[in-house]
Image (cartoon, helix red, strand yellow):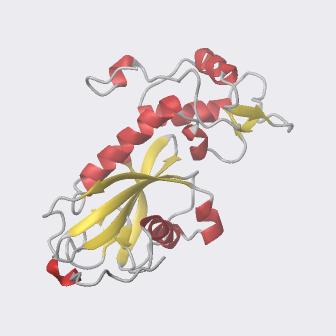
Amino acid sequence: MSTAAPAGYDPHAFTPFAVTVDLAVFTVREERLHVLLVERGQEPFLGHWALPGGFVAPRECAEDAARRELAEETGLDADAVGGLHLEQLRTYTDPDRDPRMRVVSVAYAALLPDLPEPRGGGDAAGAGWWDVSAVGDLAFDHGLILADARERIGAKLEYTCLATAFCPPEFTLGELQQVYETVWGVELDRPNFRRKVLATPGFVEAVEAPPRRTGGRGKPAAVHRAGTATTLHPPLLRPPLLRPEGKQP
């Protein structure tokens, strides 16, 4: 199929604008939900913290740009980044969201098991994992993007097997429960959580490996890995008080 512009079409008849990607990258560290932030090394917002991201190249699609930026900030190679959970969140189009020019951002949410300290790529002056509860004002409209991404992740844990993306390849049910408690900010009943997880087809699979000690007085915990399912039937719902106002199961 030809990609040439139709005869008589004037591309200069419309005001040009730039497209960027912004990444809300979450992980669980020390039983707290953390997000990857970078310190801006140039204007605008020099010295302010922001979500990682960058401009989409002329011959690059948004998802490829998001994965490229993710690799630059985390130090992971392309193969490792390709296996991570990355999903498009929203497109942010406020005309005044960037003081440089009209910039439309395609935002993505990514989930990672615990990683070493990020290195910060591109023009970033630094990078680090921040406890989500301790994040202050961010550059651009990144505070809004972060809030939207956190709500998206919390909601998806109810209906999908996404929680296993926060876990290492092999994990205990206690570690899986810790993901839910960390993202939702609530303590769950252990026997009830275990019963629901094991009763959900394809959520987790037992691993033939020596059980792991978890620090408790009971017997060692069995080890599991992510199962083949992608959705939860029935869903594993948040406690009612944690649901956004007006949203029902």
Q: Is residue 105 above or below residue 163?
A: below
- Taking 236 as reference, is 99 left or right? left
Does any portion of residue 213 appear in the rendered image?
no
Quadrant of the image for the C terminus? top left
**Near-viewer residue (71 or 86):** 86
- Taking 156 as reference, is 113 left or right? right
Does any portion of residue 51 appear in the rendered image?
yes
Residue 154 point in image, percent of width and height: 42, 36
Residue closest to the far front = 7
Q: Is residue 39 above or below residue 164?
A: below
**Near-viewer residue (8 or 147):** 8
Q: Is residue 241 above or below residue 68?
A: above
Using the rendered view, name the quadrant where residue 160 is placed.
top right
**Near-viewer residue (117 or 112):** 112
Residue 107 point in image, percent of width and height: 36, 57
Residue 157 point in image, percent of width and height: 50, 34
Residue at the image position 41 percent from the left and 67 percent from the top: 127
Residue at the image position 35 percent from the left and 25 percent from the top: 242
Using the rendered view, name the quadrant where residue 184 is placed.
top left
- All told, the count of numbered labels is 0
Residue at the image position 49 percent from the left and 71 percent from the top: 68
